[in-house]
């Protein structure tokens, strides 16, 4: 035993003294190098700040976003109404700001719901395999074979209108995608020796999935979820455009687009600004997702 | 070593389905382990050697419960593990542990060393909560690692150190039997000796029994009391270590032994070179599995049932040359 201890004492890793650099920390260091991702992250944080501030202190808005004024309809952008006014004389700038909350909330909540179910279905299918796998994945395949927005509209028709129903419809539609990704990741991780080792020392299946497998596939799931937020926002806008989202007078970007579309030649700013808000938000989430993917993929790391 | 049998493997088989037809009917099977029987006595180190793909790791994985045998029995301490339902089978995890071949793959990269070693203690309720940490330190010291390493992640360690962590994890449940699945083949030669010495001292310290799987006879020579030689899913020969090394009877064992390099030029033995490759276990040769490459091929090999025969005390051979009493005396 003595010689063994001596050999270990002189080994090179003796020089480590403190807590190691965690995987998240190195991911963050790598993400910092990516300018587009950092700008996107800043933009997203700004949106979150706007969403929080406008819901807690609505008085910071330059105008009441719900107040109609029929004498001031379709005004072009000016010093008082920065983005102009809509067909009912409401301030577009204020409505876009207050609409941030709805869009972000829809994106995050919808992804959270679909991710939860996606992880549950995907890990059951991937871990247990066999007939369970076949049944779950065939149902997912059937859902994937229908265009998602069409399926969402069908769900809306069954559930009724309202932004809460829209969130449910959007998350239901997105489940198969997450289930597929999680299943694939689990298939690749579950044959690892450390998962086998966890079985040998007497872990139960549930603990193996959640303690040993999921943490090792989480990074790729997070990337997908970030990208998923943008498609959820887009889906919500599409439903809003079709009049299936929020109920008037609530402000939502897609809904604003839909209601203003008759004035596209008369007052294009009524569409340009909500459209820009959607595009920029979606772009920011996409760029952040791409940045995260690069940061988590050791092969594409720059340093 | 006592005479008490700890593990009795009887006619163990494991077939893997390679392909199925459209209707889900199996059309070809891979016979990874085909009717293998052996016994391990309490306190013994039983070596199992054979080339890659001969089924030795599959046997190890069946014993720890990672694979379900196709047929046969694994009798541990009088209980047939193969007949137990899943839940009860898990109880025996405490008694039979596995040390993995690749120390880089066998530790969860997202867990600290302390958590990896503490987990078996916690889930099996082996210590009260407040004593778990003490137990982890104890185990780390057991395998020659400093208890300061508790909060580190596996990637900070070298192969040999990782293997020690794997050994500590296996020891955490206080097992009686440890299946060592080529525990040193992924390590540097200098580290191999260290880990082998560690395994040996742990064996006497905790009264362990080993099933030591390796692909070369030289590593097994160091640690085992008895050695079994496998080829294409069958056991070819079982003998006490010295008997096997000095008096190998099966032609395959002879070929294996002749392949061990020697640094002493005067002691160089005649190297037996085998022709061809190992046949596919999907469609193995009829009769003796080794007959297609054997340098002593006899006609009756093709009809030989590959059963082990005790030719002298504790020395079992499966070879048609030793099948039947008359033949035996001729060749001994």
Image (tube, helix red, strand yellow):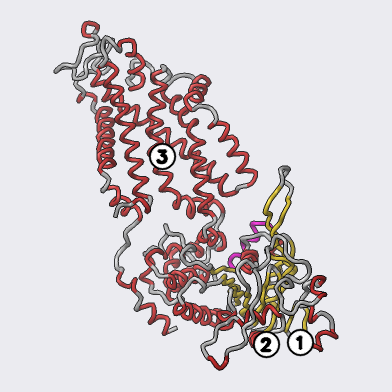
**Stretch of the chain drawn in magenta:** B85-95
Task: Quarter of the image for the N terminus of chain B: give it.
Answer: bottom right
Q: For mark 3, give the secondary structure.
A: helix
**Is residue B84 visible in the rendered structure shown here?**
no
Rendering quarter of residue B312: bottom right
Considering only vertical position in the picture, is A130 above or below B78? Answer: above
Q: Looking at the picture, how far across and down is residue B30, in whole percent?
A: 69, 59
Residue pictured at 21% horizontal, 6% vertical: A71
Q: Which residue is mark 2?
A: B243
Per the model, the C-alpha gap separating discs 1 and 3 is: 67 Å
Per the model, the C-alpha gap separating discs 2 and 3 is: 63 Å
Q: Which residue is mark 3?
A: A225
Q: Main secondary structure of the magenta part?
A: helix
Q: For mark 2, give the secondary structure.
A: helix
Of circles 1 and 3, which is in front?
1
- Disc 2 sits on a residue from what chain? B
Please say if the residues under marks 1 and 2 sit with CB atoms less than 8 Å apart.
yes
Q: For mark 1, give the secondary structure.
A: strand
Considering only vertical position in the picture, is B289 above or below A46? Answer: below
Per the model, the C-alpha gap separating discs 1 and 2 is: 10 Å
Residue found at the very far front of the displayed protein:
B275
Q: Residues within 10 Å of mark 1 (few under 14, many from 20)?
A: few
Residue pictured at 57% horizontal, 44% vertical: A125
Q: Which residue is mark 1?
A: B312
- Disc 3 sits on a residue from what chain? A
Q: Looking at the picture, how far across and down is residue A26, in whole percent?
A: 31, 54
What mark, if any, has residue B121 been given in the picture? none
Same chain for mark 1 and mark 3? The answer is no
Same chain for mark 2 and mark 3? The answer is no
Q: Nearer the viewer, residue A192 or B167?
A: A192
Q: Residues within 10 Å of mark 3 (few under 14, many from 20)?
A: many
Considering only vertical position in the picture, is A138 above or below B15? Answer: above
């Amino acid at each position: 035993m003595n010689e063994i201890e001596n050999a270990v004492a002189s080994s090179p890793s003796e020089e480590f003294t403190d807590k190691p650099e965690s995987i998240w920390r190195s991911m963050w260091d790598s993400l910092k190098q990516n300018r587009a991702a950092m700008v996107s992250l800043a933009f997203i944080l700004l949106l979150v700040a706007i969403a929080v501030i406008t819901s807690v202190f609505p008085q910071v808005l330059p105008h009441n976003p719900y107040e109609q004024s029929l004498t001031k309809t379709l005004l072009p952008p000016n010093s008082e109404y920065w983005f102009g006014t809509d067909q009912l004389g409401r301030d577009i700038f204020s409505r876009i700001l207050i609409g941030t909350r709805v869009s972000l909330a829809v994106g995050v909540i919808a992804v959270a719901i679909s991710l939860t179910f996606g992880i549950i279905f995907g890990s059951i299918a991937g871990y247990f395999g066999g007939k369970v796998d076949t049944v779950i994945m065939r149902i997912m395949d059937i859902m994937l074979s229908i265009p998602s927005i069409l399926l969402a509209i069908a769900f809306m028709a069954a559930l009724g209108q309202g932004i809460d129903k829209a969130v449910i419809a959007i998350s239901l539609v997105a489940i198969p995608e997450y289930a597929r990704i999680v299943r694939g990741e689990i298939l690749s991780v579950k044959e690892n020796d450390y998962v086998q080792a966890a079985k040998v020392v007497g872990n139960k299946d549930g603990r193996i999935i959640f303690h040993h497998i999921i943490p090792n596939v989480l990074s790729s799931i997070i990337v997908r979820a970030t990208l998923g937020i943008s498609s959820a926002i887009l889906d919500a806008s599409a439903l809003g455009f079709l009049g299936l989202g929020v109920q008037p007078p609530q402000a939502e970007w897609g809904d604003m687009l839909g209601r203003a579309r008759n004035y596209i030649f008369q007052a294009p700013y009524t569409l340009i600004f909500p459209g820009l808000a959607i595009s920029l938000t979606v772009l920011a989430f996409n760029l952040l997702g791409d940045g995260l993917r690069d940061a988590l993929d050791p092969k594409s790391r720059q340093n | 070593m006592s005479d008490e049998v700890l593990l009795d493997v009887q006619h163990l088989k494991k077939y893997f389905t390679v392909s199925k037809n459209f209707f889900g009917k199996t059309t070809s099977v891979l016979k990874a382990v085909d009717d293998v029987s052996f016994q391990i006595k309490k306190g013994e180190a039983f070596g199992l050697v054979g080339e890659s793909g001969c089924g030795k790791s599959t046997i190890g994985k069946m014993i720890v419960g990672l694979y379900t045998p196709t047929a046969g029995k694994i009798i541990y301490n009088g209980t047939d593990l193969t007949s137990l339902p899943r839940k009860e089978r898990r109880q025996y995890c405490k008694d039979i542990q596995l040390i993995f071949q690749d120390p880089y793959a066998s530790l969860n990269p997202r867990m600290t060393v302390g958590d990896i070693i503490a987990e078996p203690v916690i889930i099996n309720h082996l210590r009260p909560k407040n004593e778990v940490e003490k137990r982890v330190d104890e185990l780390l010291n057991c395998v020659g690692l400093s208890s300061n390493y508790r909060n580190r992640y596996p990637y900070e360690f070298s192969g040999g150190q990782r293997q020690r962590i794997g050994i500590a994890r296996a020891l955490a449940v206080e097992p009686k039997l440890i299946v060592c699945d080529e525990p040193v083949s992924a390590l540097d030669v200098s580290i191999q000796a260290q880990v082998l010495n560690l395994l040996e001292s742990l064996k006497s310290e905790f009264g362990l029994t080993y099933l030591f799987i390796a692909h070369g006879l030289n590593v097994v020579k160091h640690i085992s009391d008895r050695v079994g030689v496998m080829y294409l899913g069958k056991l070819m020969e079982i003998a006490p270590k010295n008997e096997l090394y000095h008096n190998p009877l099966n032609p395959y064992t002879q070929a294996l032994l002749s392949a061990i390099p020697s640094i002493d030029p005067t002691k160089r033995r005649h190297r037996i070179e085998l022709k061809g490759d190992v046949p596919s276990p999907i469609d193995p040769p009829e009769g003796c599995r080794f007959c297609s490459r054997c340098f002593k091929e006899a006609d009756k090999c093709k009809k030989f049932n590959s059963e082990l025969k005790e030719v002298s005390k504790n020395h079992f051979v499966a070879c048609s040359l030793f099948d039947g009493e008359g033949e035996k005396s001729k060749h001994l």
